[in-house]
Image (cartoon, rainbow, N blue to C red):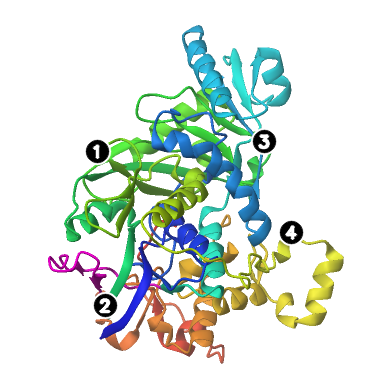
Amino acid sequence: MTDRQVHDVVVIGGGVVGVTLARTLARYHLDVVLLERDAEVGFGVSKANSGIIHSGIHADPDTVKGSLEWPGNVGWLSLRDELGFGFAQVGELLVALSEDELPTIDRLHAQGERKGVPGLERWDQQRVRRHQPNLSREVIAALWAPTAGVINPYEAVLLIAESATRNGVEVATGEPVTAIDPPDPADQDAPIVLRTPMRTLASRYVVNAAGLYADEVARMAGVGTFTISGRKGEEYLLDKRLAGLVTSIIFPCPTATSKGTLVTPTFDGTIMVGPTAEATDDKHDTATTPEGAAEVFEAAGRLVPGIDERDVIAEFAGVRAVADTDDFVLGTTHRRGFLNAAGIQSPGLTAAPAIADHLLEVLREEGLELIERADFAPRLEPPVRFGVLPTEEQAALVHRDPRFAQLVCRCELVTEAEIVDAIDRGARTLDGVKFRTRAGMGRCQGGSCTWRCIELLADRRGQAITEVTKRGGGSWIVCDRDDVDAAPQPPPSPVAAPPAAAPTDEVTPMSRDRGEVSRHADHP
């Protein structure tokens, strides 16, 4: 199918940078399309990270990423106020375990002050112990940065995309860009033509925010001047019984390639440890490893001795997009109208609002006319979080909608009403439901609620149970019994069989829907 309309801007990639830019563009009278290859936005690099909004001290201010780190931090505050996702400024402590690390603390302190980061303080051992009594006694000093925060990155991406959609942006998921036509030599101002499996689009401007695949998209456009490689980070989520073990983000002194293994109190109350930083040629390698776990828990134990690998309830890995420039690749290319937003490694999540503002100005300078809309709606009604509400508010919700009385996820106290709302707001997959509601993120990791979430997805979206996937594509969860080869029967046992069970009229979910749950396990 050919889309004959010439769009103003097409954004390639529905990660945090892509959706934040799309929402920023939605403030103006523009025709904007966002193309995302996965079944839902935020399913790539953006969902598998530490969920930290950096204080602003870490990146070199003489780099592009360093210049956008602190402005990005500030930008998240207004996004939180407008959209209502989980974000709390818990502060960070960058700790020194030896005299040799004290110059690093001094350097980052000076770097933060140069950027204008407020509230920085050098703490001695006694002050550190008063603030975080569970830290190692080997900590001799720390840099306190109160502006650091923790965020639910997947929830933020989904709500930013929802806001963009409600303000007129077309967000097309499951639609990868497969080709970009060469420029017309007879008309340098001709629109850029992009091809997907579904259609052909033309746009005056294209922004390449394709994450791990940004170098491939750039090559399609004939501007392949950089290479993206992967750097895998493994993260481990601990049981909520450890909530409060630390109340601020704990950073070790950084190395040349990594900020090290962090101990992070997540917005939802669990403790997360990680990441590793392992170079990989496989952009799909999101497997956790025994070696990664050993590295993480050895490093985390040096910071917080009370951390134990036996408390792990979930583990996952993400692959970060690292450009060979070792910096963000932002701005124009030698192809008119084609811009890059590539190599967005740490502090990419933090910098995303500032990246969007920066690209907006580049587009303006390139000739995009920006006329503000009077009807832009910045605020979004956030989803209900039943489990954290006072009893009186819970009772009022149940009176209004009895589905709030139907508990689906017992670990995270998620109700049927919340899951239905998530589906109505755009969840198409089991992970889409999980990232919007936290159903399946608790101690049992979906053992109790997965089947009911699948049923609600199928019912609300008018699908068969077998059409519901974990994260789109071939990530099936349930298959029809007719499609499964009969398992070979074991030989008869010489031992007498036990008496047959009495007949029962009980109907199980499996027999009712003639479906079978896959034993394929996948990380969150």
Q: Are marks 4 and 2 in contact (CB under 8 Å)?
A: no
Q: Which one is closest to the eye, mark 4 or mark 2?
A: 4
Local secondary structure at mark 1? loop
Q: Mark 2 belongs to which amino acid?
A: Ala
* Earlier-in-chain disc, 4 versus 2: 4
Q: Residues in magenta?
A: 172-196
Image vertical order of residue 154 relative to residue 141, above or below: below
Picture residue at 56% right of the left edge, 66% below the top:
372
Question: Foreground residue, 94 or 344?
Answer: 344
- How packed mark 1 is, by other alpha carbons closer than 10 Å (few <14, some 14-19, many 20 or more), is some
Q: Which mark is residue 388?
A: 4
Real-space Cα distance between discs 3 and 1?
36 Å
Q: Residue 369 location in percent, x, y?
A: 44, 64
Image vertical order of residue 71 relative to residue 6, above or below: above
Real-space Cα distance between discs 3 and 4?
19 Å
Pointer 3 residue = 247
Q: Which is the main secondary structure of the residues drawn in magenta? A: loop
Q: Mark 1 belongs to which amino acid?
A: Asp
* Earlier-in-chain disc, 2 versus 3: 3
Q: Residue 161 location in percent, x, y?
A: 51, 66
Which quadrant does the N terminus fall into? bottom left
Pointer 2 residue = 487
Q: Which one is closest to the eye, mark 4 or mark 1?
A: 1
Q: Mark 3 belongs to which amino acid?
A: Thr
Pointer 1 residue = 324
Q: Residue 211 location in percent, x, y?
A: 33, 53
Residue 450 colored magenta? no
Quick check: 298 left or right of 441? left
Residue 180 colored magenta? yes
Real-space Cα distance between discs 4 and 1?
44 Å
